[in-house]
Image: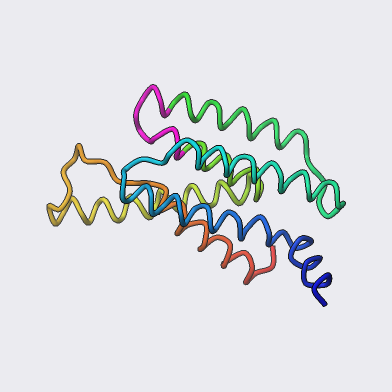
Amino acid sequence: MLQKMYTFIIQRGYMGSLIMLMGLAIMSFTDIKRRAVPVYMIIVMSILAIGIKIAEYIFGYKKVDVYEMFIILVVTTVFVVICVISHIMGAADALVMGIIAIVTGIKKATSVFFMALMFVSIISGVLLIIKRLKRKDTIPFIPFIFISYVGVMICLSLIHI
């Protein structure tokens, strides 16, 4: 019974999703409280994401697309450099999006990113209108990534993609 449940969780990719949910929840809380995410959290999540991909490959549940991993690494690197230079977002936000792309794939990560941008735009617009936020203020982005990740995973599980 336990082995069937374990196999079901691994085969469906739920293990990676559960780990990402826990990690994003912890990072969201930290980002809200401290306005920063410690580097060790990002390193732990990166190691877990790579470990999940290796486990999926070893057990034969999923193939690892080398080209997709290369594209993810290049896009994440460029994204981090742009974030550091322009200060549009924090580098941690870009790295978290890269970790999500490694675990879920580039299509789901893109959906998460654009949904998070939509949510943060709406919330910051409302906060600017009611004057609770100034134009130069910063908003923690990882909580919006967390909410978007949950939303995308729920929507995709409902339509079975």
Q: Is residue 36 above or below residue 15?
A: above
Q: Which image quarter: residue 89?
A: top left
> Relative to residue 2, is residue 76 depicted above or below?
above
Q: In the image shown, does 90 or 39 lie closer to the viewer?
A: 39
Q: Nearer the viewer, residue 10 or 101?
A: 10
Q: Is residue 122 left or right of residue 9?
A: left
Q: What is the residue that sits farthest to the bottom in this orientation?
A: 1
Q: Position of residue 62 (x, y in %)?
A: 81, 51
At x 74% / y 65%, what residue is drawn? 9
Is residue 29 shown left or right of residue 49?
A: left
Q: Residue at x 54, y 58 (%)?
A: 21
User: Picture coordinates of residue 119 (x, y %)?
Assistant: 37, 55
Please identify the quadrant where the C terminus is shown: bottom right
Percent from the top left, x then y, of residue 92? Answer: 45, 37
Q: Residue at x 37, y 47 (%)?
A: 31
From the viewer's side, name the closer residue of 60 and 1.
1
Q: Is residue 87 magenta?
A: yes
Q: Which residues are magenta?
A: 83-93
Q: Quadrant of the N terminus?
A: bottom right
> Does the magenta segment cover residue 110?
no
